Amino acid sequence: MIPEEVHSEVRKLRELIQYYNKLYYSENRSEITDGEYDALLRRLIMLESQWPELQTEDSPSRRVGSEPVAGFPPIRWNPPMLSLDNVFSDEEFQEFNGRIMRELDLDSTPVYSVEPKLDGLAIALIYRDGLLISAGTRGDGTEGEDITPNARTVHSIPLRLTRPFPGTLIVRGEVIFRKDDFKRMNQNRTKEDLNPFVNPRNAASGSLRQLDSRITASRPLSFISYGTAEWPDGTTSQSDLFLLLDSLGIPVSPLNSVCESIEEVKTAFEKLEDLRDSLPFEIDGVVIKLNEASLQQKIGIQSRFPRWAAAWKFKAEEVVTRLLDINIQVGRTGRLTPVASLEPVFVGGVTVSSATLHNEDELLKKDARLGDMVIVRRAGDVIPEVVRSLGRPSEEERGQRFEFPDRCPVCGGPIARPEGEAVHRCMNPSCPARLRESIFHWASRDALDIEGLGRKLARQLVETGFVNDISDLYHLSRQQLSSMERMGEKSAENLIKELQKSRSTNLQRFITGLGIPGVGRTIAGLLADRFSTIKDIMEAEAEDFIDIDGIGPVLAENLHTFFHEPVTLGVVERLLQAGFNPENKHTHNSEKPLDGMTVVFTGGISMSRSNARNIAEEAGATVTGSVSSKTDLIVAGPFAGSKLQKARELGIEIIDEEEFLRRL
């Protein structure tokens, strides 16, 4: 039987350790030395070892870490963990505020919550009935890595909330290194002949993603929360939410503020920018959020960003170095980006030896040439970029201007610059640099609609070497597919059936799937309406494309190039050899309820936009994303914004989703 005095001492030790954790991590102060804190923790561990019955999952002694794991299991986020859109100037913030006021139909500036933008790794903590049960990284927003054992080692993350909280609470926040902790850790690493970490942000990310949680436990990480996945009962604002989190023992930033005007937001931004170097942790800007929960919910989210928040970044540090070379990189979507090779220079906390020049227009505008001295900064404190060239002492000493290539440096295929865009793209869907993304696009709902062929499988197919060309998808065997990770016999058989079914696709989907720069589902529909077969398109001249309303001379030339250049033409021919014979299966019929109409969807509707578009197109309509004088019909749901307003100004017919479905 455990003596009552032992029970009492263990309870007291846990309370003291949690109290000192809160002081240090939430209030940035301490009433005891590190040695005294360590003595309290050692005493607790000793008592729990002597009396194992006293051990609990939420004890501070559980923060020592455990044996290494083979890998991190996935963890799903619903609602997703979104990124933030950025503003970089007073003018851009004014635009953000103006959009908020227009879309919410406000007469005055709303109340904003202004918070320091922490520079670390975003994670979410899941509490059930007050006990921490799991934690994970943001990942791609919908799926992250389950890092629960590592999160449990972070002293500022409460293993149990400090007061009862029934049900589930998902807390979101940032794992960071405080500057002093980071400095001490690097000093210790130097003494142990280990390489010091370059900056707190990368160190925090790497520390939290260690497969051996004992390594994570040895590093003095901190956690600061910035919100929750859903509004807890009783909270009606961001400021209410922070008060609740603080009362539950979850660290929040003491620098958060509530601003009732544009001027107050600017003042808060300037104050934090002035304090930046003296703060105990790294920040790279402020986060501005609508304070009221009801307004956040009303204005909603985009696919990647919440519409009710933005990150206002501080001005980036700039340094001077020499430009040694310019190379072209090809991204996963086929985008060609000029990249400068530089004499290594330390900027924004990291050593930079290469920097983006963005695109051909920016390259010409900056007139950066080999040997020039250039100004470099880390855009948004993340991506190194060349700001401008300082030239050479004498203009005669400067090299030639860089000539942008007309061929992809990876596959030798043709490149195109879509009308209205600043970037060039490789046109070859089977280019090794963009193949993974091309497969995913080919299988997407708007294109061939191949169920079961997502991004992860596309990556595996390329990495295993099973697919080196889009047409290789149609030569995959069940044996190859079932040999892949998480692909059993049944999944392999289902995918083979889906691929077989996709061979009977129509012309519009086939063209969409090719991923020709500038050609989406709408343009593909115009081409399918004009030509009967893919053979007709392959034999068409640029003038034939220009004759189609909606296709300009640049896109017409790009289409002609795609279907006549050997590299890209070869992709189409190999698909035809694989069993495709796409024809125009959409014929105009006067009985179709939306025949010949141009339709725009806006606001919140119950069906997905992709499904709505498919239904409208089957009814004979052309669906576009913008409102113009050529638009015939607007289908508007709740919270429709500027598109609805423009439609009213143009006198376009506006109906709701119920009426849309009735007409069909």
Image: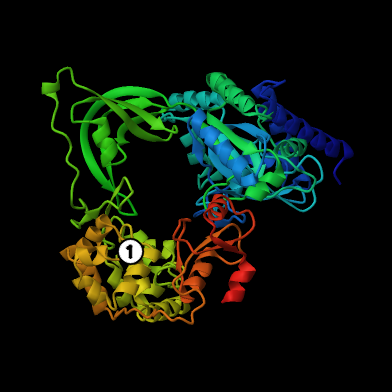
Write down the quadrant of residue 108 in the picture: top right
Residue 168 placement, left or right of 205: right
Of 264 and 472, nearer the camera is: 264
Task: Determine the secondary structure under disc 1.
Answer: loop
Residue 330 in the image, given as x and y percentages of width and height: 28, 49
Q: Residue, x 59% and y 20% (percent of image)?
A: 271
Residue 119 shows in this picture: no
Colour treatment of the image: rainbow
Please tell me whether residue 105 is drawn above or below residue 13 in the rendered image.
below
Residue 383 in the image, given as x and y percentages of width and height: 39, 36
Name of the residue lying farthest toward the front: 651
Residue 132 shows in this picture: yes
Residue 250 in the image, given as x and y percentages of width and height: 70, 38
Residue 328 in the image, given as x and y percentages of width and height: 24, 44
Of 195 and 266, nearer the camera is: 266
Mark 1 crowdedness (10 Å alpha carbons): few <14, some 14-19, many ≥20: few
Write down the quadrant of residue 315 in the picture: top left
Q: What type is the residue that disc 1 sits on?
A: Asp
Write down the quadrant of residue 546 in the picture: bottom left
Q: Residue, x 45% and y 81% (percent of image)?
A: 590
Residue 658 placement, left or right of 564: right
Residue 399 placement, left or right of 268: left
Name of the residue lying farthest toward the right: 4
Please tell me whether residue 514 is drawn above or below residue 347 in the rendered image.
below
Name of the residue lying farthest toward the left: 396
Q: Residue, x 38% and y 61% (percent of image)?
A: 459
Q: Which residue is mark 1?
A: 549
Which quarter of the figure is the C terminus placed in? bottom right
Of 81 and 5, nearer the camera is: 81
Residue 147 placement, left or right of 162: left
Please tell me whether residue 3 is drawn above or below residue 434 in the rendered image.
above
In this rendering, the count of numbered labels is: 1
